[in-house]
Image (cartoon, helix red, strand yellow):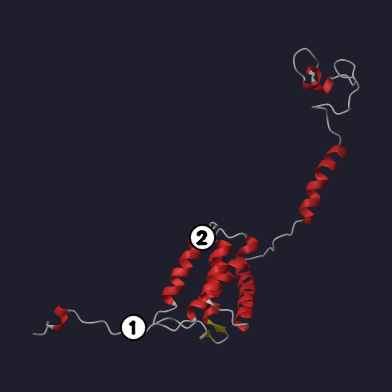
Amino acid sequence: PAALLGGAGGPPASRAAPGGAHGAPSSGVVLGAPQTEDDRRRRRRPRAEAAAAAPSAPTFQTRDEAIEALATQVKERVARVRKHGGFDEASAWAKLDARFGKTELSCVAHTVRQLGRYYGRHDRRVELTTQWRKDIAKWEKLVHSLAAWTLKMAVPVDERVIFLSDVIVYMHACWRAKPAKRGRPKENHRSRHAGR
């Protein structure tokens, strides 16, 4: 009715008669009517309950704390995989691709694959399990370095540990292959006859 909507031919909605335009019983809810504090409180309650039920992301005082927390969780996950010998390149890639192959991180995942397959078989590769410093292996140093970059990437907060763990596990899987033996490069015709 025009009276409830505040249109032409009737009073504004906030001033409408309780019985409506034609004297019909009203539901008591009038569009535009001032709301009481109880109304506002009832409307806010579902939002507050939903916010309380949602898991809150951990907060850190500094960026270094966030990097250390992420790296620690990743190292624990990778250590469990190492303990059970789960470094198989095909299965490691299948997990990485299944989780992130069709997301915004698809290009990153495929780049990781190409780099892993190339450097894992290089004859001058760095051995990930050797020590970088006294108390940290080179693969652990790699975790800390990548953790800093992961915080800057479009990785959802609740998927950072899984993403970086999958990347490191795939790197370990690529490094299981023996490095290819590369022969000494052949001299070209010009270099062989340069001294003649």
Residue 113 location, x and y as percent?
A: 47, 69
Instruction: Determine the residue positioned at 51% across, 60% down.
Output: 106
Residue 170 falls left or right of residue 68: left
Residue 102 location, x and y as percent?
A: 54, 58
Instruction: Determine the residue positioned at 53% across, 70% down.
Output: 93
| Residue closest to the far left | 196
Residue holding disc 1: 182
- Front residue of 63 and 182: 182
Q: Which mark is residue 74?
A: none
Residue type of the residue flagged with mark 1: Arg
Where is residue 162, by image quadrant? bottom right
- Front residue of 166 and 55: 166
Q: Is residue 172 above or below residue 60?
A: below
Q: Residues within 10 Å of mark 2 (few under 14, many from 20)?
A: some
Q: Is residue 151 visible?
A: no
- Front residue of 136 and 26: 26
Residue type of the residue flagged with mark 2: Ser
Instruction: Determine the residue positioned at 62% across, 70% down.
Output: 70
- How far is disc 1 from disc 2 in space, using C-alphas? 32 Å
In the rendered image, which quarter contains the C terminus?
A: bottom left
Question: Which label's residue is closer to the chain start, 1 or 2?
Answer: 2
Q: Residues within 10 Å of mark 1 (few under 14, many from 20)?
A: few
Q: Is residue 179 visible?
A: yes
| Residue closest to the far top | 9
Residue 86 falls left or right of residue 54: left
Residue 67 location, x and y as percent?
A: 60, 69
Residue 180 falls left or right of residue 48: left
Residue holding disc 2: 106
Residue 138 location, x and y as percent?
A: 51, 81
Instruction: Determine the residue positioned at 42% across, 79% down.
Output: 121
In the rendered image, which quarter contains the N terminus?
A: top right
Instruction: Indicate the secondary structure of the residue bearing disc 2.
Output: helix
